[in-house]
């Protein structure tokens, strides 16, 4: 059986980037992809209105200046179909498909300590042998479907936003229920409301949202960005979130009120996520956050006409940014439509599904279709679904029973030659993920090609280093407001999931420094054999 230097699992944005870079570094690589197509979450989240809330010029690969120049984005915030076209273009442009096995779902990976090799098995029984197992499974790819009583009895159609059907879904004349008001629920509601007979939005936790300020990109703007693309990339890499925003030095409450309101107003209309970085302490200190949260509450309320609905959609239970805010395109205006209704499931919880629809504790909502926009088992979900077995027969599930432990988000002790991209312990979900992907993949390519040249066959995180890094990730999070509420960042929104902060909140620039220091110290915190 042929042996690979690396088997990469997943052909989304990180898997494709890893394939390109590893191949360029002279490694023999194959990618296994469960779906029939490349694209990862952008292949699966085909719901109407799906759109990226990072600007298109920044949510793209930086490894090829030619690619940067030839691809023409059409809008400031790209739609899912446009991103999927981009990903497919990259796959063709760099001849990636010849090393990708689609329709190949990894079910297990077992490490053989005697020869330092992984054996990876797919659902159909095929196996691959590789020195390294590189997990590019995504941060938000394992869907979360609540198990309501009576769900199987419901006569209508049930769809999860993160596993949208390939065929066209027709809403005309239908009564549609949407459960969840995170980014997915907020993005799809205005679009579905445009054709459905009636939409009921089932809201549990009100979510902060900033309008997308989307617009078509003109040729002049495109030219301007492309003339200075490298500077723009550098600015992203050196900004805390990889989005290019640099917070000023002035703290929120130090700014005079009129000046502060003007700064909020401008950011609200122009920056999307950047709103959180208008001042450096918004995500760190409650008094500063209160001012920003109040501003947003007022703005959100102004967009809703019905005073009862207005009161319900305004979040009072968590600070702005402690959970992932949305960047919406007309969500609150959609709530003003005659055919849209908000059902507050905190006030009247869902009791069960029936053949006709959803019964809350006050009434029956008759529906023809229910869409679960209920989110994902974030960061660890996709990594823990397959059976991954390291040294001494230990599974990754056992190892992470009390929460994920990693050295730099990349390696796990007891799991030699298993390398994770944008998983827990890395900036991933808190950043422009493209920047995070590229940092990690380039670092891994240098690591693996260096090892190959030196004849080293095994790399493993030390227990001491992974404990130290995991503690550091926790400490950083406790310096912020992220642990003041339950969220998919800290596992608190899934019953039974360990409540630990998973992503690294120190920013992409600090993270890059940690990676660099580690490599320069001969991969400190890892043992190479
Ligand atoms: O998921 P979410 P999402 N009964 O977890 C509710 C990325 N993304 O798919 O908080 C009733 O944010 C839940 O309520 P609660 C982005 O990172 C990116 O919307 O559990 N409600 C919440 O309102 C985003 O943040 C883009 O009380 C239930 C909602 O479902 C992430 O994906 C676009 C419930 C889930 O919100 C996830 O977004 C879209 C239940 N049993 C998504 N269970 C980009 O633009 C859950 N909820 C890049």
Image: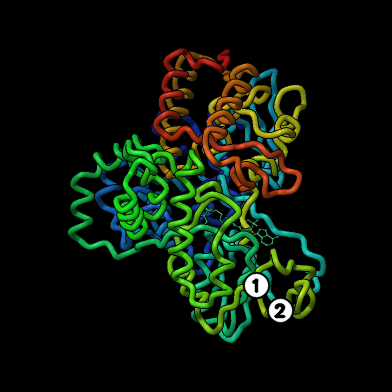
Side (left or right) of 526 relative to 245: right
Q: x, y percentage for residue 485?
A: 62, 46
Q: At numbered mark 2, what does the secondary structure look like: helix, strand or loop?
A: strand
Q: Which quadrant: the N terminus?
A: top right
Looking at the rendering, which quadrant does residue 369 occupy? bottom right
Query: Residue at left 71%, top 81%?
Result: 366
Q: x, y percentage for residue 121?
A: 68, 40
- Mark 2 or 1: in front is 1
Side (left or right) of 447 relative to 269: right
Can residue 152 be seen at all in this image of the molecule? yes
Quadrant observed for ligand 1 in the rendered image: bottom right
Q: x, y percentage for residue 455?
A: 51, 14
Can residue 460 be seen at all in this image of the molecule? no
- Of residues 313 and 181, the one drawn nearer to the viewer in this rendering: 313
Where does label 1 land, which residue?
Answer: 343
Eyeballing the image, is 363 above or below 128? below
Q: Ligand 1: does it lie within 8 Å of the C-beta at label 2?
A: no
Eyeballing the image, is 102 above or below 354? above
- Report, in whole angstroms, how far the alpha carbon at label 2 lies from the one at label 1: 9 Å
Query: Residue at left 33%, top 38%?
Result: 250
Where does label 2 land, which residue?
Answer: 365
Q: Which quadrant: the C terminus?
A: top right
Eyeballing the image, is 471 above or below 368? above
Q: x, y percentage for residue 24?
A: 39, 33
Query: Residue at left 45%, top 17%?
Result: 453
Side (left or right) of 290 relative to 350: left
Query: Residue at left 52%, top 64%?
Result: 46
- Label 1 neighbour load within 10 Å: few <14, some 14-19, many 20+: many
Q: Ligand 1: does it lie within 8 Å of the C-beta at label 1?
A: no
Q: At numbered mark 1, what does the secondary structure look like: helix, strand or loop?
A: strand
Q: Of the residues under marks 2 and 1, which one precedes in the sequence?
A: 1
Looking at the rendering, which quadrant does residue 213 occupy? bottom left
């Amino acid at each position: 059986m042929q042996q690979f230097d690396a088997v990469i699992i997943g052909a989304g944005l990180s898997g494709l980037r890893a394939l390109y870079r590893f191949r360029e570094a002279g490694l023999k690589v194959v990618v296994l992809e469960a779906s029939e197509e490349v694209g990862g979450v952008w292949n699966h989240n085909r719901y109407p209105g799906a759109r990226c809330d990072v600007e298109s010029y920044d949510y793209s690969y930086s490894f090829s200046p030619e690619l940067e120049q030839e691809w023409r984005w059409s809008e400031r915030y790209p739609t899912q179909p446009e991103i999927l076209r981009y990903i497919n273009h990259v796959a063709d442009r760099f001849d990636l498909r010849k090393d990708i096995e689609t329709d190949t779902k990894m079910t297990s990976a077992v490490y053989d300590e005697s020869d330092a090799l992984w054996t990876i098995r797919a659902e159909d029984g095929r196996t691959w042998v590789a020195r390294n197992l590189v997990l590019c499974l995504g941060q938000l790819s394992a869907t979360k479907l609540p198990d309501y009583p009576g769900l199987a009895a419901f006569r209508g159609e049930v769809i999860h936003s993160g596993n949208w059907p390939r065929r066209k879904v027709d809403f005309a004349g239908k009564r549609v229920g949407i459960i969840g008001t995170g980014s997915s629920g907020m993005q799809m509601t205005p679009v579905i409301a445009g054709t459905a007979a009636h939409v009921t939005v089932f809201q549990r936790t009100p979510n902060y949202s900033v309008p997308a300020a989307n617009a078509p990109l003109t040729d002049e703007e495109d030219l301007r960005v492309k003339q200075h693309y490298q500077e723009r990339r550098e600015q992203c890499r050196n900004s805390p979130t990889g989005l290019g925003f640099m917070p000023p030095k002035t703290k929120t409450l130090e700014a005079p009120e009129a000046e502060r309101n003007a700064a909020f107003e401008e950011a609200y209309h122009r920056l999307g996520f950047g709103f959180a970085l208008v001042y450096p302490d918004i995500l760190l200190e409650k008094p500063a956050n209160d001012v920003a949260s109040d501003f947003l509450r007022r703005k959100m309320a102004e967009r809703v006409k019905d005073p009862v609905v207005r009161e319900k959609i305004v979040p009072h239970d968590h600070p702005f940014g402690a959970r992932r805010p949305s960047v919406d395109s007309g969500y609150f205006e959609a709530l003003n439509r005659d055919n849209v209704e908000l059902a507050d499931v905190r006030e009247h919880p869902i009791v069960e599904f029936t053949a006709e629809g959803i019964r809350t504790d006050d009434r029956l909502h008759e529906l023809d279709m229910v869409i679960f926009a209920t989110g994902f088992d974030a960061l660890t979900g996709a990594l823990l679904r397959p059976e991954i077995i390291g040294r001494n027969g230990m599974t990754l599930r056992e190892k992470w029973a009390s929460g994920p432990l990693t050295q730099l988000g990349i390696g796990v002790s007891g799991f030699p030659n298993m390398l994770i991209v944008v998983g827990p312990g890395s900036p991933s979900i808190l950043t422009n993920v493209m920047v995070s992907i590229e940092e990690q993949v380039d670092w891994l390519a240098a690591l693996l090609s260096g090892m190959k040249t030196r004849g080293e066959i095994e790399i493993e995180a030390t227990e001491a280093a992974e404990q130290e890094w995991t503690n550091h990730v926790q400490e950083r999070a406790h310096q912020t407001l992220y642990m003041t509420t339950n969220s998919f960042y800290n596992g608190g929104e899934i019953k039974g999931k360990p409540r630990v902060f998973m992503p690294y909140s120190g920013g992409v620039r600090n993270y890059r420094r940690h990676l660099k220091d580690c490599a320069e110290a001969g991969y400190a915190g890892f043992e190479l054999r």
